[in-house]
Amino acid sequence: MTALADQGLLDLGPETLEYRMIGPRPDAAPTLVMLHEGLGCVGMWGDFPDKLAAATGCGVFVYSRAGYGKSSPVPLPRQITYMHEEASQSLPRLLDAIGFQRGILVGHSDGASIAAIYGGSHQDHRVRGLVLMAPHFIVEDVSVRSIAAAREAYNGADLRTRLAKYHSNVDVAFRGWNDVWLENDFRQWDISEELAYIRVPILIVQGVDDQYGTVRQIEIAQEECYCPVDVALLPGVKHNPAREATDITLQMVSDFVRRILRSHETAASAA
């Protein structure tokens, strides 16, 4: 494969994805692959990926899923299976295309759910752990209420204007996320079964005041997973720990990453 530039567009055939690569490339160090939230993209992570690379010594690969940022658009309406499709089709192609050799998936919200689905449906020995920030494994009433409120904010133009700074086709980005939750029988969406098949350690980082999910999401992971599940429940934080509590989130994630990767290195040297 061609060496990854610091940023650009990754041609995966069916889709072209915007990306940034910070730090060492996958052939030189473990890689943290970051999967954004339902309205996120490369740019909306801010400098958190850069801080994570500096704190861990890992390479950090950040990308915008199709329909977001500067990536290729997607046809609407999306189906309620869109996160499963990301985990079964797009993410495997991406990992192979960047030459991913070993590392951890770091997901936020929708991205956390996609990472969990991937971890539970692919026995990918390159993936050593999962960091799930504000994940959702089931749909709660609070989730639907907040998504409905987001639609009102978008129709009122303020949210649309802010999102348009990051997304080339802002209506596709917003409606591809919002409509699928509000206009389908999304309450039947449930990925708790996949959790039982994850075979790597998990860190869940969630705000106590998360407006999109309650601690029930954490309880489900603790009930269903057979793998170790570490939890960082952050008081005074809503749905975006990386933005709202950057320092403590960075510390929690970095400590987990270093511990998981170090344990693999120790096991490999012992063998």
Image (spheres, helix red, strand yellow):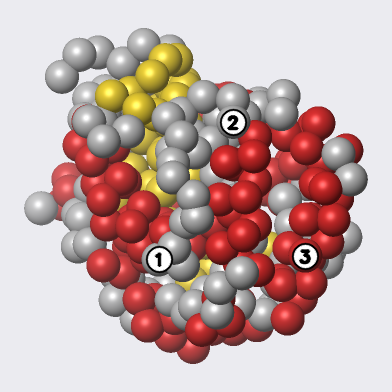
Q: Residues within 10 Å of mark 1 (few under 14, many from 20)?
A: few
Most extreme residue toward the bottom is 223
The N terminus: image quadrant: top left
| Residue wearing tag 1 | 81
102 with respect to 16 (left or right): left
Q: Position of residue 24 (x, y in %)?
A: 37, 20
Q: Answer with the quarter of the image where residue 16 lies.
A: top left
Badge number at residue 169: 2
Q: Which amino acid does the dot numbered 2 rest on?
A: Asn
Q: Which amino acid does the dot numbered 3 rest on?
A: Ala
44 with respect to 77 (left or right): right
Q: Secondary structure at mark 2?
A: loop
For the point 23% across and 40% down, which residue is it?
Answer: 93
Badge number at residue 148: 3
Q: Nearer the viewer, residue 258 or 226?
A: 226
Q: Position of residue 223 (x, y in %)?
A: 49, 88
Sequence-first disc among 3 and 1: 1
* 52 is higher (above) or lower (below) than 117: above
Separation of residues labelled 3 and 1 (CA atoms) = 20 Å
Q: Position of residue 132 (x, y in %)?
A: 53, 58
Separation of residues labelled 2 and 1 (CA atoms) = 22 Å
Asked whether residue 116 appears in the rendered view, the answer is no
46 with respect to 19 (left or right): right
**Given contact means CB atoms under 8 Å apart, are the residues at marks 2 and 3 in contact?**
no
Foreground tag (2 vs 1) = 2
For the point 38% across and 47% down, which residue is it?
Answer: 104
* 258 is higher (above) or lower (below) than 135: above
